[in-house]
């Protein structure tokens, strides 16, 4: 059997013989809480399929299943200069995309770090910050000025309802963001107004979810691409459905949007199982939710996205140290008690440490947390990071499996992006293995039929292509939204 991804994780060196029995018992207990076996994965996927359907129904469900008003596939012949911005979890990326018309493109880009206070600050500050970054960028790439208004594709990676493509009514902030006065409102006019204030000639043509951008950008170069996925600070997926199979659109589309028209769907499946019926939540997941600014929401995301992995690890370590007195005895735990002090780079580095005595873990805990660790403690820390990381990968692919089952895809390239997919050690291997566990492909299969592949740049190229497709539709007098939107 040949797989696109290696079959097993590298074998870790070292044994647990030097770990005290009481601590070992805790590790075993954690293992049983965090390992999700194949049967449970399949159960989750079946429930997931039903929830995707509910999201498309007139009554609606927990998963928003937002029609994205992208109604054709890219041809590769799109041309022109487009700006794209991506307001992600941690950065603002500004990109100038030159679509060449022959499935080719050029990009020039700049990343601006989002100051921490913006995530929870005032709405106006956020839009002005973005508009100023845009102006700086445009001044730099067009030093002699730009004669025409630049069309912009705005990648907004939060659940936003869209009655038309240049609209995004924020349903709720996710990934730790919490800015008053934006939820329930359309973010496009807010950005457009700020753009006008700073005096730069840009027209926000389309608002795009990062998963939809990923899907479209990947379809541009890979005809087998069927899903666009983000495994990063947040998790989500997009795919193309067909208008007549989306009951909630029945009777609401203008005549030129035909029943057989494709329609990109931004699933927003981070909210899967907000009813808490199927996911194997631990007390650490319950605590993550209780301490989050949006309780009860993004249940699935809170168990597997990058934003929470370090925090889950921190809760477990704190419990072992503070309540159970099994690790870090006599040490100052002040830093470990700080929420979110361990971002995803923490478990990532812990899993990556190549040394048998885990000296890099020792250095990390010493420098970032002021905690001196023993070798057995470090082995336990690594084991816990593996449990959290592996559960993340195994749960993550349930979204993929559910979409493929729903659409009846027997083969698919699932185009993925995001910090966890790109950087978290072992994620790709674990995810591929979990898909095999779910679909139980026989050993006679030469290659996994459904594979996760690296995506094209969704929030840059994808947003630009979608902006181009939108401009073309508008030029042809076609609709880009609901009747009367
Ligand atoms: C957001 C989605 C986004 C995903 C990945 C989630 O928190 O709700 O809109 O696609 O993160 O960035």
Image (cartoon, grey):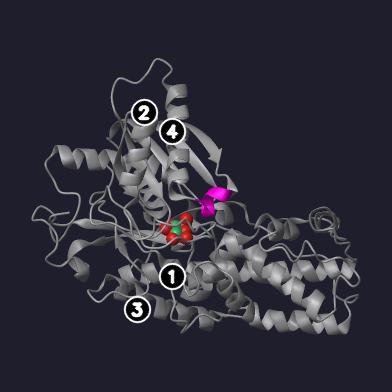
User: Where the C terminus falls, by quadrant?
Assistant: bottom left
Magenta residue span: 117-121
Which residue: 47% across, 44% down? 125
* Residue holding disc 4: 134
The answer to whether 390 appears left or right of 251 in the picture is right
In 3D space, how far apart are the residues under numbered discs 2 and 4 (Cα atoms)?
Answer: 10 Å
Q: In front of the other: label 3 or label 2?
A: 2
Question: Residue 304 placed where, x, y %?
Answer: 56, 67
Q: Is residue 88 magenta?
A: no
Q: Quadrant of residue 387?
A: bottom right
- Check disc 2 and report its element: helix, strand or loop: loop
* Residue at the spot of label 1: 271
Question: Ligand 1: does it lie within 8 Å of the C-beta at label 1?
Answer: yes
**Residue 40 falls left or right of residue 350:** left
Which residue is tagged 2?
A: 199
Mark 4, other Cα within 10 Å: few <14 / some 14–19 / many ≥20: many
What element does badge 3 sit on? helix
Query: At which x and y percent is residue 225?
Result: 38, 53
Is 118 colored magenta in this rendering? Answer: yes
Q: Position of residue 116 (x, y in %)?
A: 59, 49
Mark sitting on residue 50: 3
């Amino acid at each position: 059997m040949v797989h696109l991804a290696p079959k097993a994780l590298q074998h870790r060196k070292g044994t647990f013989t030097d770990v005290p029995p009481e601590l070992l018992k805790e590790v075993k207990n954690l293992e049983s809480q965090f390992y999700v076996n194949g049967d449970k994965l399949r159960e989750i996927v079946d429930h997931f399929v039903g929830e995707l359907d509910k999201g498309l129904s007139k009554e609606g469900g927990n998963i928003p299943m937002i029609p994205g008003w992208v109604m054709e596939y890219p041809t590769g012949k799109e041309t022109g200069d487009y700006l794209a911005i991506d307001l992600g979890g941690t950065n603002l990326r500004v990109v100038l995309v030159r679509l060449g018309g022959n499935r080719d493109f050029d990009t020039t880009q700049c990343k601006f770090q989002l100051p921490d206070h913006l995530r929870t600050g005032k709405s106006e500050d956020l839009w002005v910050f973005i508009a100023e970054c845009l102006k700086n960028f445009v001044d730099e790439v067009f030093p002699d000025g730009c004669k025409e208004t630049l069309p912009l594709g705005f990648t907004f990676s939060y659940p936003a309802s869209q009655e038309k493509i240049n609209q995004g009514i924020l349903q709720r902030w996710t990934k730790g963001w919490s800015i008053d006065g934006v939820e329930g409102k359309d973010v496009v006019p807010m950005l457009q107004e700020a753009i006008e204030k700073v005096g730069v000639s840009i027209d926000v043509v389309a608002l795009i979810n990062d998963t939809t951008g990923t899907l479209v950008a990947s379809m541009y170069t890979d005809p087998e691409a069927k899903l666009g996925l983000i495994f990063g600070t947040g998790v989500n997926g997009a795919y193309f459905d067909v208008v007549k199979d989306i009951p909630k659109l029945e009777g609401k589309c203008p005549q030129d949007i035909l029943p057989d028209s494709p329609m990109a769907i931004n699933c927003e499946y981070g909210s899967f199982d907000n009813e808490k019926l199927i996911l194997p939540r631990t007390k650490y997941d319950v605590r993550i939710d209780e301490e989050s600014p949006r309780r009860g929401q993004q249940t699935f995301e809170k168990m597997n996205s990058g934003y929470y992995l370090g925090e889950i690890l921190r809760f477990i370590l704190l419990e072992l140290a503070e309540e159970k007195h099994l690790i870090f005895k006599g040490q100052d735990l002040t830093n470990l008690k700080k929420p979110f002090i361990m971002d995803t780079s923490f478990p990532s580095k812990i899993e990556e440490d190549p040394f048998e005595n885990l000296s890099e873990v020792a250095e990390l805990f010493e420098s970032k947390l002021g905690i001196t660790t023993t070798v057995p403690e470090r082995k336990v820390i690594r084991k816990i990071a593996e449990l959290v990381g592996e559960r993340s990968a195994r749960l993550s692919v349930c979204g993929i499996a559910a979409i493929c089952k729903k659409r009846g895809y027997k083969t698919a390239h699932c185009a993925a992006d995001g910090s966890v997919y790109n950087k978290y050690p072992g994620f790709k291997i674990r995810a591929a293995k979990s898909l095999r566990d779910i679909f139980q492909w026989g050993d006679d299969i030469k290659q996994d039929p459904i594979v996760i592949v690296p995506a094209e740049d969704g929030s840059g190229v994808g947003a630009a292509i979608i902006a181009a497709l939108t401009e073309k539709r508008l030029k042809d007098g076609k609709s880009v939204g609901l009747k009367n939107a």
